[in-house]
């Protein structure tokens, strides 16, 4: 305040120094209300150059951080290592999301669907092949939609936090993204595992361990791929309403193009099946239960080949490896898209 008094800009009334400085920053002075803002700012700049510029410059030059061309090249951009950043973000993510992922409402929802599903398909056997096929298709769709719509909100909701923390170089984007991805695994996979384990045995599917664990693996793989699609869509659009609208269209496209509802798809739109997560998961689930040459009772004292059943014949029981590779590619590509989309936010370091 002494400085401003010395240049004839002392406040005429007692006031908070912060408010006084803010008024000056906006070109407002209590000295003479007739002065315009441009004139006041020009006067302040001239006074600074005449009274303070040289001393301020000298002080700055004493500080090595402000000395031009003398920045220490050994100074690290990041205050902590990648592993330390990952560890902190991983623990923070678990603490923040465990209550959301395992909220009472969500657990009740999944358990209710589990019980209803198990009762509807109670001890179904291969003589009711359509029922079993319907259950496998339900697995592919239910655990495609749930993780997708959970994930699509992730980055739009965290956008403001990411912009602030990444722009201030608090951590690398790669450490955040890795911690986010790995931190979600236990929370995203426990409920699907519980659901599948209960409904599988209630529905009377093949009791052999190989069939059960292959089906469980495919179901969890479906969760991860669908989650990746949700993360990618949310990261690219960054608007919850738009992402959920487009996501609904995409998931419905995958559902209808999976080969379960429409078995004679016109050629001009048959390309949908090649990008449909549901189609690959459904095919793999069929392969986890049935093998080529296997039969089922299709009439009085008659048996038919499982692969000739209409809902199965469209996809076939071969080509399981191709479906698995396709899902693996989607798993990587969707997360890569999400990562690249997040690089738009803040000042990013890899």
Image (cartoon, grey):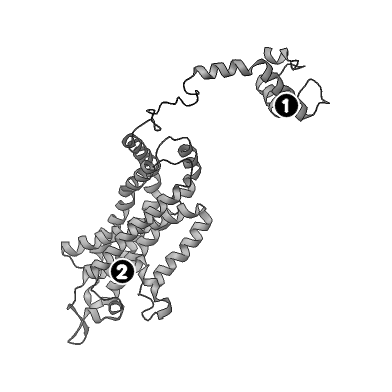
- Horizontally, residue 44 falls left or right of residue 157, namely right
Q: Nearer the viewer, residue 210 or 339?
A: 339
Q: Nearer the viewer, residue 86 or 300?
A: 86
Whole-percent x, y for residue 174 in the image: 37, 43
Q: Residue at x 42, y 51 (%)?
A: 340
Label 2 element class:
helix
Would you place residue 260 above or below residue 93 in this image? below
- List x then y, in percent, for residue 139: 32, 65
Which residue sits at x=29%, y=73%? 133
Instruction: State how far apart marks 1 and 2 are (Cα).
Output: 71 Å
Q: Residue at x 42, y 76 (%)?
A: 269
Q: In the picture provided, is 54 more to the left or to the right than 213?
A: right
Image location (x, y in percent) of residue 99: 39, 44
User: In the drawing, what numbered circle is on residue 187?
Assistant: none
Identity of the residue furthest to the right in this view: 34
Q: Quadrant of residue 12?
A: top right
Residue 228 found in image quarter: bottom left
Q: Which mark is residue 282?
A: 2
Element class at badge 1: helix
Q: In the rendered image, which quarter contains the N terminus? A: top right
Residue 62 in percent (x, y) is at 50, 16
Residue picked out by circle 1 = 41
Which of the marked residues, 1 or 2, is nearer the chain's N terminus? 1
Crowd band around label 1 with a 10 angstrom C-alpha radius: few (<14), some (14–19), many (20+): some
| Nearest to viewer (mark 1 / mark 2) | 1
The quadrant of the image that shows the C terminus is: top left
């Amino acid at each position: 305040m002494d400085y401003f008094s010395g240049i004839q800009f002392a406040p005429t009334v007692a006031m908070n120094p912060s408010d006084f400085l803010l008024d000056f920053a906006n070109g407002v002075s209590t000295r003479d209300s007739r002065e315009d803002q441009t004139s006041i700012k020009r006067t302040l700049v001239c006074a600074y150059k005449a009274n303070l510029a040289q001393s301020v410059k000298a002080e700055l030059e004493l500080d090595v951080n402000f000395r031009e061309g003398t920045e220490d090249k050994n100074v690290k951009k990041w205050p902590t290592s990648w592993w330390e950043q990952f560890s902190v973000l991983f623990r923070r993510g678990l603490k923040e999301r465990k209550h959301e992922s395992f909220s009472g409402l969500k657990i009740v929802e999944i358990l209710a669907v589990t019980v209803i599903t198990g009762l509807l398909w109670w001890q179904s056997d291969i003589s009711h092949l359509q029922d079993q096929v319907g259950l496998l298709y339900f697995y592919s769709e239910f655990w495609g939609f749930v993780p997708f719509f959970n994930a699509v909100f992730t980055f739009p909701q965290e956008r403001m936090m990411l912009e602030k923390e990444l722009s201030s170089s608090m951590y690398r984007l790669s450490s955040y993204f890795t911690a986010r991805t790995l931190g979600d695994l236990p929370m995203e996979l426990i409920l699907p595992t519980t659901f599948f384990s209960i409904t599988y045995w209630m529905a009377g599917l093949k009791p052999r361990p190989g069939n059960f664990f292959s089906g469980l693996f495919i179901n969890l793989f479906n969760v991860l791929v669908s989650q990746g699609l949700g993360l990618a869509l949310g990261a690219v659009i960054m608007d919850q309403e738009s992402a959920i609208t487009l996501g609904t269209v995409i998931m419905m496209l995958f559902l209808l193009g999976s080969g379960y509802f429409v078995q004679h798809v016109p050629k001009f739109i048959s390309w949908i099946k090649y990008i449909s997560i549901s189609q690959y998961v459904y095919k793999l689930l069929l392969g986890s239960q049935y093998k080529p040459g296997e039969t089922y009772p299709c009439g009085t004292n008659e048996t038919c080949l499982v692969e000739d059943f209409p809902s199965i014949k469209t996809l076939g029981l071969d080509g399981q490896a191709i479906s698995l590779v396709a899902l693996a590619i989607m798993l990587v590509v969707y997360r890569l898209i999400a990562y690249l989309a997040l690089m738009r936010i803040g000042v990013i370091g890899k």
